[in-house]
Image (cartoon, grey):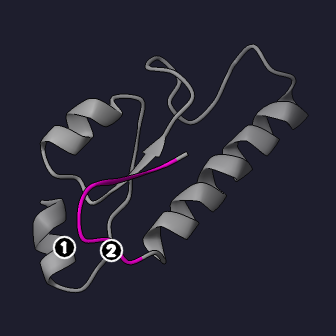
Amino acid sequence: MAKEFEAAGMPVAYLTTLDGLARSVGAPRIVRGKAITNVAGDPNLRPSDERALRKELINKALKALTTPVNEPTTFD
């Protein structure tokens, strides 16, 4: 589905901890998440720290969406 979005001019970024799998299926932009069980958060953090973590992940995803790529690219 991502390839169809990309072909239509809509960039796609995957937030995942399985970046090897995302790369193998040709995901254009890969943003590494925190953990398999909590990709976009960490329940062990204080609420303020978890908000900061989520904000960091969103900022990485936004950077990925605005970066032109020609092959699967991981944004750390």
Q: Residue at x 18, y 62 (%)?
A: 2
The quarter of the picture where the N terminus appears is bottom left
Q: Residue at x 62, y 48 (%)?
A: 57
Residue at label 1? 5
Q: Residue at x 27, y 32 (%)?
A: 20
Of residues 42 and 60, the one nearer the viewer is 60
Give neighbour class at mark 1: few <14, some 14-19, many 20+ (Cα, 10 Å): few
As helix, strand or loop, the secondary structure at mark 1 comes to helix
Q: Is residue 66 left or right of residue 24?
A: right
Q: CA distance from mark 2 to mark 1?
A: 7 Å
As helix, strand or loop, the secondary structure at mark 2 comes to loop
Q: To which quarter of the image does residue 8 belong?
A: bottom left
Q: Is residue 50 left or right of residue 13?
A: right
Give neighbour class at mark 2: few <14, some 14-19, many 20+ (Cα, 10 Å): some
Of residues 48 and 3, the one nearer the viewer is 3
Of residues 40 and 71, the one nearer the viewer is 71
Q: Residue at x 77, y 33 (%)?
A: 50
Mark 2 or mark 1: whose residue is earlier in sequence: 1
User: Amino acid under label 1?
Assistant: Phe
In the rendered structure, which segment of residues is drawn in magenta? Answer: 68-75
Q: Are marks 2 and 1 in contact (CB under 8 Å)?
A: yes
Outermost residue to the top? 44
Residue 12 drawn at (x, y percent)? 32, 65
Residue 65 drawn at (x, y percent)? 45, 71
Seen in the picture, residue 1 relative to 7 is either above or below; the reply is above
User: Amino acid under label 2?
Assistant: Pro
Q: To which quarter of the image does residue 49 belong?
A: top right
Residue at label 2? 11
Q: Is residue 12 left or right of residue 6?
A: right
